[in-house]
Image (cartoon, rainbow, N blue to C red):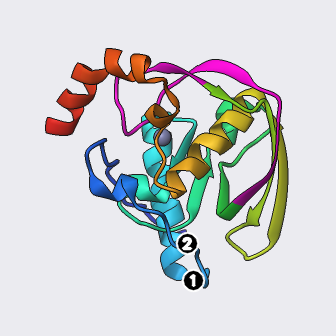
Amino acid sequence: MTSQVNKILPIRIFGDPVLRKKARAIENIDGSIDQLARGMMESLSQARGLGLAAPQVGQSKALCIINLPLLDEKAKQPLVVINPKIYLREGEVNYEEGCLSFPGIYAEVNRPKKIALTGFDLDGNELEYEADDILARVFLHETDHLDGVLFIDHLSTIKRQLLKSKLKKLNQD
Ligand code: ZN
């Protein structure tokens, strides 16, 4: 048996312009996409994060990974979603949130409680997913990344003001 070692892709930190770019839709799920997804899985499991979007590893492509095994004990594999589209948002809930691109920064963010989305898996099969609470939040957070939107954008001016010195520090490091 040959063991393939996937390279860990370094996670981009706030201040990196790629985090503000709108990701391009993926038209061909080819070997490069497969490799990107595998590299992202390594990065995500090493960081023990709940989710990771391709722009966070410097690739402006509409792909994100949800670390399902951390959220659902029945799940064995992280979920890869290509070209995700959220078509239903319901309710509202405020909860503390962080981001691998903002180490050490957490803030309460208001988000829909329930969502439903469509997308494609790595084999090009259409997938549909419904989620609520934390899982819904992770999907919303990751699909935001694909639009160049970051979790701090959802904070009030006052809350963002309180984080200003911490954000400035990340931006400079
Ligand atoms: Zn994030």
Question: Residue at 34% across / 48% down in the picture?
Answer: 11
Residue projecting furthest to the left:
172
Q: Which residues are magenta?
A: 85-109
Q: Is residue 81 left or right of residue 15?
A: right
Based on the displayed image, in which of its 4 quarters is residue 7 positioned? bottom left
The residue where tag 2 is placed is 34
Question: Residue at 56% across / 48% down in the picture?
Answer: 144
Q: Is residue 44 left or right of residue 102?
A: right
Does the image show residue 173? no
Neighbours of disc 1 within 10 Å: few (<14), some (14-19), many (20+) = few
Question: Residue at 53% across / 63% down in the picture?
Answer: 37
Name the residue nearer the viewer: 4 or 22: 22
Q: Are marks 1 and 2 in contact (CB under 8 Å)?
A: yes
Q: Please determine whether, in this image, residue 147 is positioned above or below residue 89.
A: below
- The x, y position of residue 32, in whole percent, is 48, 78
Amino acid marked by disc 2: Asp
Q: Quadrant of the N terminus?
A: bottom right
Name the residue nearer the viewer: 119 or 41: 119
The residue where tag 1 is placed is 30
Q: Is residue 155 left or right of residue 63?
A: left
- The x, y position of residue 47, in whole percent, is 43, 36
Based on the displayed image, in which of its 4 quarters is residue 140 positioned? top right
Q: Is residue 122 left or right of residue 127?
A: left
Q: Quadrant of the C terminus?
A: top left
Amino acid marked by disc 1: Asp
Neighbours of disc 2 within 10 Å: few (<14), some (14-19), many (20+) = some
Based on the displayed image, in which of its 4 quarters is residue 135 positioned? top right
Q: Please determine whether, in this image, residue 34 is positioned above or below residue 155.
A: below
